[in-house]
Every structure is written in C-alpha cells, then in structure tokens.
Amino acid sequence: MTLPRIKVLALGGTIATRPDASGAMQMGLGADDLVAAVPALATLAAIDAETVSKVGSHSLGFDHLHALATKIAALDVDGVIVTQGTDTLEETAFLLDLLLDRDIPVIVTAAMRNPALTSPDGPGNLLAAVRVACDPWVRAHARALGVMAVMLDEVYAASDVLKVHPTRLNAFAAPQTGPLAALVEDRVVPLALPVREAITAAHARLAASAGGKAAPVALCWFGLDEPGFMIEALVDHPDRLGYRGAVLGAMGGGHVPERVVPLVERLAALLPTVVSPRAGGGPMLRQTYGGPSSEIALRKAGLIWGGRLHPLKARVLLETCLRAGLSRDIIAEVFDAFG
Ligand code: GLU
C-alpha cells in the first residue's frame, strides 16, 4: 500500500524548543527532530520534513506567511502540516486559509507544553495532525474543510479557531462553531463541514494577492470610557504612523463610546476601518439601535462591518485585502459576506 505523502514544514514555537544551559527554553529543534520524536508517523505516511524557520510565532510576520503560502501552493504532496508556536496560530491559520485554495489537507499544529515538561503535547499533536491529513474523509473534503488547526485531538476550521487560554493544555477552541472532527483511538470522527461561502468569495477577490506590499493595520480595542487618544493619533498623523487600515474591537453588537464617534467617523473617511466584535466573534447587529454611536449610525458613516470575525481575524483579512490592492468598496463587500 502506498502511504500518503505528507510534507511537514516547521516554523518554530514551543513544539520546537529545547532547554539551554540555564534551563530556559529556546528555539532549537528542526522539522526532522519533530518527526523523529514520533516513530508512529512512519506507519501512517511518507513524511518529508523541512525546517522553514526557528522563530516564535509571536515574531512571525505577514511576509513569512505569504512566502509559506507560495511554498505550499507549489508542493506536489498529499497533505501539508505546518508546526509553529501557539501564540498566533489563530491568525496564521486564517491567513493561510485566505491565501491557499488547495484540494489537499493543510493543517497547522503546535504545542502548549514544551518538550522538557512531563507529557509534552507536541508529539501527540503532530501525530494527530498527520492522522487527520491521511484520513479518507478529510482528504475527500479537503477543499470544503479549508485550512485546519489540530490541537489536543480536535480539528478546527482556520476561520473559527481561537486561542482561549495562555497556558492551559486545552488552550484552543472554536467557540462559535465547535470542532470539525474529533480524534478517538486511531479514528478521525467527522462532526461538521464549515460554511465557507465568505472565504470562497474572498478567494475570488484575493486571487492575485501573493507578493503584494505590506499594509499595516491598527487594532484598537474599545474598553469602558475609552477616551479615543489612539484614534486621534491615527487621524492626525496617518503618514507618521503608517497604518493603511484599522480594526476597531467594538462593544456589543457594534457600538463605540459616544464621545469617540466623531473621531471614528474621521478615521473611516481616511482609512478602511472595520468594526469587529470585542466579544470575540459572532455576527453583529445591523439595524437595531439608533443614536450617534449605534450600529445604524456607524454603518451610515462608512464603517466596514466585520461580520462574525474575531477582531484578530478581521485584522488579518483587512491586511490581506489592502496588500492585494482592493478598493474600500470591494473590501466592504468581502467583509459583508461574513455576516
Ligand atoms: N510564544 C511562543 C510562540 O508562539 C511560544 C508559545 C507556544 O508555542 O505555545 O511560538
């Protein structure tokens, strides 16, 4: 029997750390080390391992991920596993999902517990990721599943997975939708297919996006009594700050404190500005509340509605749209499809 050909691309992260002389964990392991630590992989797949970088995911950039997507797009394999740090996995997986449109499984995995601890989860997560990549149901539905994250025996859609705890083993979840599949014994048990119309529509608009110029996006999170000084700085010094777009982590169904509304409106006139729910995702309101700080007023004033996307994912999508050179109206259309 011919085993599926799986490419493992290692970026770094806790999964790839080892202790230095002081006992502090440092990036150090490469893709071959990760694969060698899990002999059972050889019974599932013909693995080809490549170390792309040894970088903590908190230091990855959009350019790294664009280069990775270009590499993955050109691979002649049956599945791809990306190993990286957990800190930005919810963003990198979504970016890869926006940039790739392949009919093979592409899976991102990582580890919460480093290799020097008792019961590190990296080897088990890598084994689970390869098992998912080789699973017949997953392979048959690869395009419909999009890029996936596999953590702690659950499979998540890239657009929905969130890191919900900084240190716990069960740090990942898809609070809005739940997992796509679960691993039990040696089986992958399918649970759901993701709704991907908005991603597919984004793909059509982003088709030529690889290689565009970086487009920094500011992320402003609104808390109780926010005075708006950061928005003021964006509005007053757009060239000095260099941001090309902004995401506002808004309250409730899409509200900001009334005192900052004039600033937010000026910002929206200056840069594509997306309103996204600070509650962490879920469709926002469109036509319930009145008054100057309501969703009705903000939408009329030209704010782009972020739909169900978490602010971090909205930021990834906006950067990707701006980098691709999309106009404000097309960007609004891309976001509108997210609900
Ligand atoms: N901050 C590091 C990173 O994201 C380590 C955290 C982790 O991998 O869990 O790569």
Image (cartoon, rainbow, N blue to C red):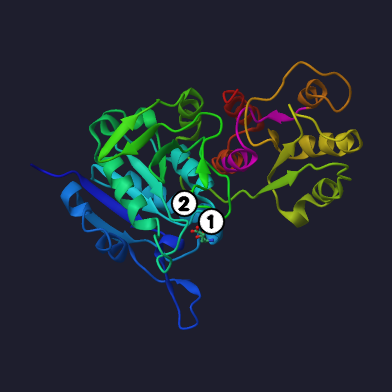
Closest to the observer, 225 or 55:
225
Indicate left or right for 214 with 201 as reference.
right
* Residue depicted at 86% across the width and 49% down the height: 229
Q: Secondary structure at mark 1?
A: loop
Relative to residue 161, is residue 166 depicted above or below?
below
Relative to residue 16, is residue 251 depicted above or below?
above
Figure quadrant of residue 34: bottom left
Where in the figure is residue 286, as x and y percent of width and height?
A: 72, 19
Where in the figure is residue 84, as x and y percent of width and height?
A: 43, 56
Residue at the limit of the structure toward the right, as seen here: 259
Relative to residue 303, is residue 96 depicted above or below?
below
Closest to the observer, 33 or 21:
21
Q: Secondary structure at mark 2?
A: helix
* Residue depicted at 55% across the width and 50% down the height: 213
Which residue is the site of mark 2?
65
Number of marks present in the image shown: 2
Q: Which residues are magenta?
A: 302-316
Q: Is residue 50 magenta?
A: no
Mark 1–mark 2 CB contact (< 8 Å):
yes
Q: Which mark is residue 61?
A: 1
* Residue depicted at 56% across the width and 30% down the height: 176
Where in the figure is residue 191, as x and y percent of width and height?
A: 38, 27
Residue 161 in sight from this viewpoint: yes
Q: Amino acid at mark 2?
A: Leu
Q: Badge 1: how crowded within 10 Å, few (<14), some, or many (20+)? A: few
Indicate left or right for 244 with 201 as reference.
right
Q: Badge 2: how crowded within 10 Å, few (<14), some, or many (20+)? A: some
Where in the figure is residue 151, as x and y percent of width and height?
A: 42, 46
Indicate left or right for 161 with 34 as reference.
right
Q: Is residue 305 magenta?
A: yes
